[in-house]
Amino acid sequence: MISVSVDGSPLLMMRAVREARAALNRGRNKPRELCVNYDFIDIEPETIDYLNYWLNGRADDKAIDMEDKQRTSVRCADFLAELPRIRNEIKQRRFGERAIFVLDQYNYNDLPMAEMAGLMRDLKGSEIILTFNVGSLLTYISDHAANRKPMARIGLEKYIPWEQIQTLKATDSQRWRQILQRHVAHGIKTETGAQFATLFFVRPLGSNTWDYWLIHLSNHYKAHEVMKDLHWDHATEFGHELEPGVFMQGYDANKDDRYTQQSPFDFGPDSRQRCIEGIHEHLGQIVTALNQPITIRDLVYQSASRSPGPPHSDVMDGFSWQIA
């Protein structure tokens, strides 16, 4: 067996900053400064020790820039306990409260939605990239107090159709997981209060059904568009169970694929075209119903989070041709 070491989220972030710094200064005589502060927090001492070991090793290998290493804080602590300090430090910086929170916890019940809603509300330039272990949640979900309690703790209990779970499992064995996923997805978007959101599945290889979600939350359209571009660029690695075109991130029985014959969405060419066609239809309905002028910006902003659609320029080019 061959053992291969792979960088985790902290080192991948630092390598991404290094690449961005190099790209930003390519061909420049006077370098531009890219100043990034890192706060890495984990409650397990062994994890912190392991991270420090790899940070030092990758710095020695010149895989990360020394200036980034020097601006890194590694703490063994509870993230929620550290959050007030982090929020205050971000507000005191001269960077327009710009911050990306990469919440790469394993358990789905570790992060209350209210805390993320607070970040979206209090920090004007904040973004959240969240991993959510939906596979674990659905494997053990049932209408018992032990299941309701963690969902209540993170603020999603009211979005679960508890009284329907047993019936769904018994009568729709092929799709009950997808149905519940839509309820949970709708709850996450609603409770965090982010203006823009993307939600995509990451599926393990083989028969393992423990999917997790990669969720991006932001109040800035450009950040939202960049994240969608990444998903389209990596079409073979991402997918989701929601329909193409325009959707709300919740389950609507009237749009079930047994009735609409929606095929799975895989970010391939067919999915891209179905997205564009669905968005055109939706935008046309908005313009017709308004019966008055509306800016392209407002039109796009109203629908951006409701579709996995490709870059808005591709969509709007076709739409402009249709309504010209």
Image (cartoon, rainbow, N blue to C red):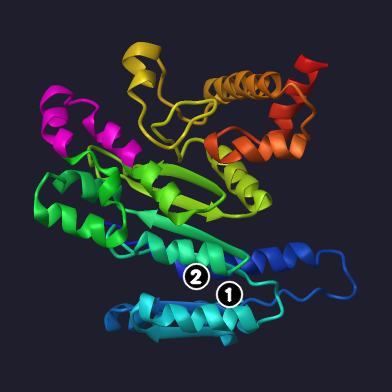
| 254 w.r.t. 59: above or below | above
| Image quadrant where one finds the C terminus | top right
Residue 78 percent coordinates (x, y): 33, 79
Tell me the quadrant of the picture where the N terminus can be found.
Answer: bottom left
Q: Is residue 123 left or right of residue 108?
A: right
The type of residue carrying mark 2 is Leu
- Residue 142 is inside the magenta segment: no
Residue 210 shows in this picture? yes
Q: Splitting the image into 4 quarters, where does residue 255 fall?
A: top left
For disc 1, the marked residue is 64
Q: Residues within 10 Å of mark 1 (few under 14, many from 20)?
A: many
Is there CB contact under 8 Å for labels 2 and 1? yes
**Please, what is the dominant secondary structure of the magenta stretch?**
helix
Q: Which residue is mark 2?
A: 11
Q: Which residues are magenta?
A: 163-183
Residue 177 highlighted magenta (yes or no): yes
